[in-house]
Image (spheres, grey):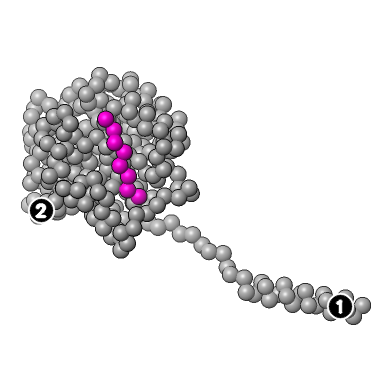
Amino acid sequence: MKKILSLSLTLLWMIACASMTQSPPLSTTEVGFTPQTIVATETSTAPVQPTSAIPTLLYISGTTHIESKPQAWPNIDEFLNFLQQVTALGMKWSVGADIGWLQGEPRAAELIQASEALGVQWDVHTHNPEDRAKAAYLITQMGGHPTTVVSGMLVSEFNSIAPQTYQGFTWTPQVLWGGTNCPGHRPGCDDLATGIWIPLSAEQYTVHNPNGTLIRVGGGTHQLADGLNLAQAIANGEYPYPVISFTLMVSPTSITIVNSNDGLPEIISFANQVNQYPFVRWENIEETAQAWVKAGSVSSRIEMK
């Protein structure tokens, strides 16, 4: 009996000691994101590798560019109606307007304010690089809130892209969208790759620089069929990157996908098809860059033709 009592006391003592030395469970905290600083400088140049715990997400955005020439301007009512319909479907859109439209369209402020109420963002799109801060300033004067997106650029301009000030207003670029190697969008000029990275320089634009400050969000070919093919490729496990981007681009005058006859009915059909994939997310260009940073800033580049 004494042996049994002694053994019981020994077991109780061992259990008590184990509970005293056991480490408490680790807590997890979601790291917040500051929109004013999209890129955090990294001290290591080693690439971040995706893990099986991080699923691939396809971020799809929509955009429209309005040039300075009046013949390229949209009908305000028709374009606003289009934006109302696509945003009602959950699609996220952004608009980039050049100086000529911002200064010459009498209903510019109306469109900016009405579209922002729908969730549309206004990026900075100018053919003269020196006009970027001015365009951002004019958007604010009309009640809008310009993003940090350089919406369209020549790759050769990359090394000179920096904060600009116009009439006391400072605009700081953080995201690059588009990119052409020669002016005029001639065949073979546009970089049609999708994927996201931070370019090293104008000369090494496709090389990722983990210590850089300008995130390049690839838009791909903008074509509906190519977007569907990309989604299917991701579903097949072809691209293991945490975040992949794709952008639909619609002409402001014809309200159709650029270089095609696909209009609103085809765009709606596309949205219904890609929404069947659980990894699809609809976000604006700037929001896609933010999601990429949150996911670990894993660089990617996917060629599309």
Question: Which structural element holds mark 2?
Answer: strand
* Vertical relation: 300 (above or below) 67: below
Q: Which residue is mark 2?
A: 165
Image quadrant assignment for residue 236: top left
Q: Residues within 10 Å of mark 1 (few under 14, many from 20)?
A: few
Q: Which residues are magenta?
A: 298-305
Q: CA distance from mark 2 to mark 1?
A: 84 Å
Residue 272 location, x and y as percent?
41, 26
Could you classify mark 2 by the number of other residues whose Cα lies within 10 Å: few (under 14), some (14-19), or many (20 or more)? Answer: some
Q: In the drawing, does residue 270 fall left or right of residue 203?
A: right
Q: Nearer the viewer, residue 45 or 178?
A: 45
Magenta-drawn stretch contains 77: no
What is the number of the mark on residue 218? none
Identify the residue at horizontal 38%, vertical 38% (top origin).
58
Residue situated in front as seen by the camera: 32 or 42: 42
Asked whether residue 302 is drawn in magenta, I would say yes
The answer to whether residue 40 is above or below residue 249 is below
Number of callouts: 2
Q: Position of residue 193 (x, y in %)?
A: 27, 37
Question: What secondary structure is the magenta-colored segment mainly?
Answer: loop
- Work out whether residue 194 can be spotted: yes
Q: Nearer the viewer, residue 157 or 17?
A: 157
* Helix, strand or loop under label 1: helix
Relative image position of residue 83 (x, y in whole percent): 27, 30
Query: Which of the 4 quarters of the picture holds residue 98?
Result: top left
Which residue is identified by label 1?
A: 5
Image quarter of residue 121: top left
Q: Amino acid at mark 2?
A: Thr
Upstream in sequence: badge 2 or badge 1: 1
Question: Which three-letter amino acid code belongs to the residue tagged 1?
Answer: Leu
